[in-house]
Amino acid sequence: MAAPTASASLNATSYVPGAQMLLTVTYGDPDNKTLTVSIVVTDAQGNSSAPVKVSPVIDPLTVAVTDDSGRTWTRVSDNGSVAVYRAVA
């Protein structure tokens, strides 16, 4: 099994105290497996619904952000491959 990958960048290279810091983390799992579940509903007369598909993530990744000053990083968004966190400088 391959280890998850991650890269990160801040929205600036330096900050004044009290400034908003935005951290963008791009992450993934190279050995992620795809699973698609298809659902069709059929009644007693043989009428069927259109197929519905869902794609679950079997082994979700978790992003944890800490820094050596003890600052709190708050998640702004996370779509499963890119997460954005905010903190105050």
Image (spheres, rainbow, N blue to C red):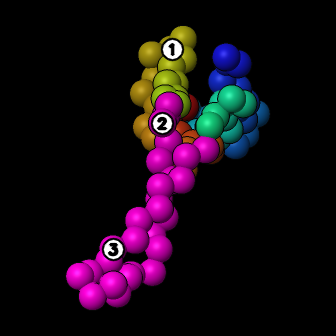
Residue 66 x %, y %: 51, 20
Q: Residue at x 41, y 65 (%)?
A: 39
Q: Residue 25 carries which label?
A: none
- Taking the view exactly as shown, the residue that stands out farthest to the left is 44
Q: What residue type is labelled 2?
A: Ile
Residue 28 x %, y %: 66, 34
Reply yes or no: does residue 11 show up in magenta. Answer: no
Q: Which amino acid does label 3 sit on?
A: Val
Circle 1 is placed at which residue position? 69
Check contact, mark 3 vs mark 2: CB within 8 A.
no
Q: Is residue 30 left or right of residue 89?
A: right
Secondary structure beneath dot 1 equals: loop
Q: Which residue is drawn at 49% across and 24% down?
A: 64
* Main secondary structure of the magenta stretch: loop
Crowding near pointer 3: few (<14 within 10 Å), some, many (20+)? few
Measure how far apart labels 3 and 2 are at the Cα level.
Answer: 24 Å
Residue 27 x %, y %: 66, 34
Q: Say whether residue 76 is visible.
A: no
Q: Report the mark closest to the observer, 3 or 2.
A: 3
Q: Which residue is drawn at 67% across and 17% down?
A: 1
Secondary structure beneath dot 2 equals: loop
Quadrant location of the C terminus in the rendered image: top right
Reply yes or no: does residue 54 show up in magenta. Answer: yes
Q: In this view, does 4 lie to the left or right of 75?
A: right
Sequence-earlier tag: 2 or 1: 2
Q: Report the mark closest to the observer, 3 or 1.
A: 3
Sequence-earlier tag: 3 or 2: 3
Circle 2 is placed at which residue position? 58
The magenta region covers: 34-60
Of 22 and 41, the residue lying toward us: 41
Q: Report the mark closest to the observer, 2 or 1.
A: 2
